Image (tube, rainbow, N blue to C red):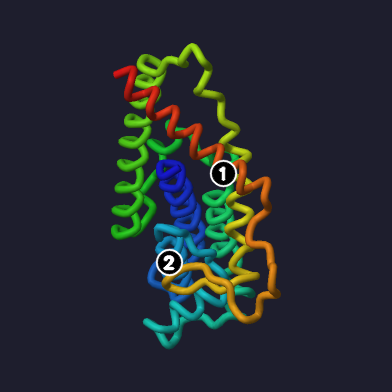
Amino acid sequence: MVSRKAAVIALATSKAAKLAERHAEGSRARYNEERISAICRALLQRKSPVKPTASLVAERGGIEDEDFPELQTIYNSYREVLAVWRKAYFDIRSVDAEDPIGLGDVRKIDTSVMDSSTAAVVEQLKAIVLELVQRVNVLKKFQDDAVTTPAHGAVQELDADRIIGRLRDWLETVADGFDLDEIGLRVSRKNIVGSRIMRRDLFDELVTFVEDYRRIRRAQDAAR
């Protein structure tokens, strides 16, 4: 997942840089697009990516630059570059989305058209992607060579994508019904007594998922 996130961000950086080239070098418009991209990229690079909305970008940009475009200006004049990063956000969050870029395309990303700081970030992301792909390939080979299914059939094929997809949907909505603070998720006075936190079938699937994962790890350890 991390390698996919890095690839999405690298691709978005490349697309945003090409959009910025429409404006003259040194112009305010180009500066604004580059700053919008920098803010959006920082939001997506967080451990838990944050959706780059126009209001949030305007707020972050205004802290450092009093002349930074306001909310309506971003909507009217810079919606294309914002759309690039919004799509990147949804690509990162969607576990079922197709890979946005192939490994060969990662190597082909041209950083010569970017400013030096952006190019440095993209080159670093490219290096991370290539290194992680190599690690994943090694892990896949290890799993193929070392993991055997016990005769009693304890290790079952997991429908991980479906379960993770349901968990993702739950995570995106649960904070709307309960209070989420720096300590954790909690029931508050606004909740009706008996409010359902999670569907029982999802809870049961998560328990089964964790137990199956533990059985797979034990099988891996035994096969070493």
Is 174 placed above or below 76 here?
Answer: above
Which mark is nearer the camera, 2 or 1?
A: 1
Front position in the image: 35 or 114: 35
Give the number of the disc on residue 24.
none
Residue beneath disc 2: 34
Residue 184 can be seen in this image:
yes
Which picture quadrant has residue 48? Answer: bottom left
Please provide percent x and percent y for residue 61.
Answer: 44, 78
Q: Is residue 53 left or right of residue 125?
A: right
Q: Type of residue at label 2?
A: Glu
Residue beneath disc 1: 206
Q: Residue at x 39, y 29 (%)?
A: 217
Q: Is residue 117 left or right of residue 154?
A: left
Q: Residue at x 69, y 67 (%)?
A: 195
Tell me which label, 2 or 1, sits earlier in the chain.
2
Is 3 placed above or below 66 here?
Answer: above
Q: Residue at x 56, y 70 (%)?
A: 53
Is 114 placed above or below 55 here?
Answer: above
